[in-house]
Amino acid sequence: MRVRGLGLKARFVLILTVALAPILAFAGLLIYIGASRIAADQRDEALSEGVRFTHDEYPYEDVRFVRRDRNGVEIHNFSYGPKSEKRGRLYRYKKKDALDHEVPFWLFVPTRAKVGDEMLGMIVGIFLVVLLAGAGAGVWAASQVSRPIRRIVDDVRQIAKGDLAHRTDAVGAGEIELLARSIDRMTRDLDDAQEAQLKLSIRERELELASGVREALLPLTTPLLEGYDLGAGFMSSVAFGGDFHDFIERPDGSVGLLVCDVSGSGVPAALVGATARSYLRAELERSEDVALSLQRVNRWLACDVRRGMFVTALYCLIHHEEGRAKVACAGHKIPLLRYSAEDDSLRVVHPEGIALGFDKGPIFDRKLEVVETPIDPGDRLLLTNSTPVTLTNADGVELGEKGFYGRVKKHAALDTGAFLKALRRDLERFAGEGGVREDVSFATIARES
């Protein structure tokens, strides 16, 4: 039996009522038939025994008036037997004859215990039949109500095994429908939570791997160069990438400063950055020819990185004894910043060149340019990735070249340690509580006065 639109309680009551109605009707029919039969039998037996008792065993013991019915018949109780242990009814009626004399009529009817026994037996039998039938009806009604619940239990077991794509197939309304919908919603939430947990786990592993790669990209020590003060800074962000800075110490005593900006973010960018750093260190340490070294690195990197990935590089080779530097730019957006102590000015040195990995040779070789710039006493050179220029504050306002260059010029005359601290402080203040959204990497060198 399917009942839609009703709650569980109403469904159970309705189903049980429908099941018990024919049983109760049948029980009533049995009672009617049995009672009618017993009444007819007892009537006949009572009359026949009353006639016989009246004429054969006329009793006079303990006759007590009970009542008079509407027909004028007096009804009395009486007792009889050796010890007056038996009971009966006396029915007496007085009628006048033609001479106006009262003529009594009476009938003694003994009470039969058999009548009550027969009625009790019939009632007990019918009760047992109704009880068994009602139990069967209850089982059937309960099965009708519990069937969708059993289906839901099976669905929950299936979901508990890990099948979060499973959906309940229980058919019902009211509480059943509400329960099924709640389980489906819970399953979808669990599926989403599991997917989010998986993504979070992958993200955490990526962060762990990228953090290790990022630490490996940064130099462990800062080289010492007579007459110069070198330093570097790195500001990490949640959106980690492959940007890095490095110091290249060559066999002849010269030192190179390198800053690279890697396209993309995450583990792929970190791995590309690690690959580029290995190639650059190997070539720039070995050869004094900056252009030739970058050309070789470009060819190797173009073969190793997938299409669309690239690395920009800004390299400055310091000839400390001569007070000059060779500068090469491979597609780096931010030029070399040169602070001149003589006139307290900030100049940019930005040679031509395209990023490493874009082209396997001809175009890169043709575009690459190497220039020289002096480093006079009190001067400072700064190499940085593009993040400081594109840094935005809480209002979405970008710091820009003008804002960043102004801060560099403001602190350039400080010693290198103080300069890096002041520059970091300015960038953190501008970014606000949100912090920098991408890694910041810079390297600097100042010539002592």
Image: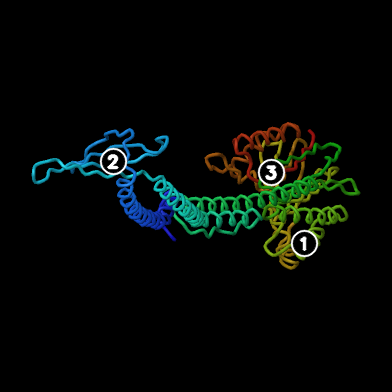
For disc 3, the neighbor class at 10 Å (few under 14, some 14 to 19, many from 20) is many
Q: Position of residue 435 (x, y in %)?
A: 63, 39
Considering every residue shown, the one lying at the far right of the view is 251
Identity, as a three-letter code, of the amino acid under mark 3: Val
Mark 2 and mark 1: span between their CA atoms? 129 Å
How many labels, in total?
3
- Work out whether mark 3 precedes mark 1 in sequence or the reverse, and give the earlier one: 1
Q: Which residue is mark 1?
A: 301
In the rendered structure, find residue 90 and report the number of the disc placed on it.
2
In the displayed structure, does residue 25 sit left or right of residue 272? left
Q: Earlier in the sequence, mark 2 or mark 3?
A: 2
Instruction: Using the image, determine if residue 77 lies above or below residue 364.
Output: above
Label 3 sits on residue: 440
Q: Label 3: state its secondary structure.
A: strand
Residue at the image position 49 percent from the left and 57 percent from the top: 140
Q: Amino acid at mark 2?
A: Leu
| Mark 2 vs mark 1: in front | 2
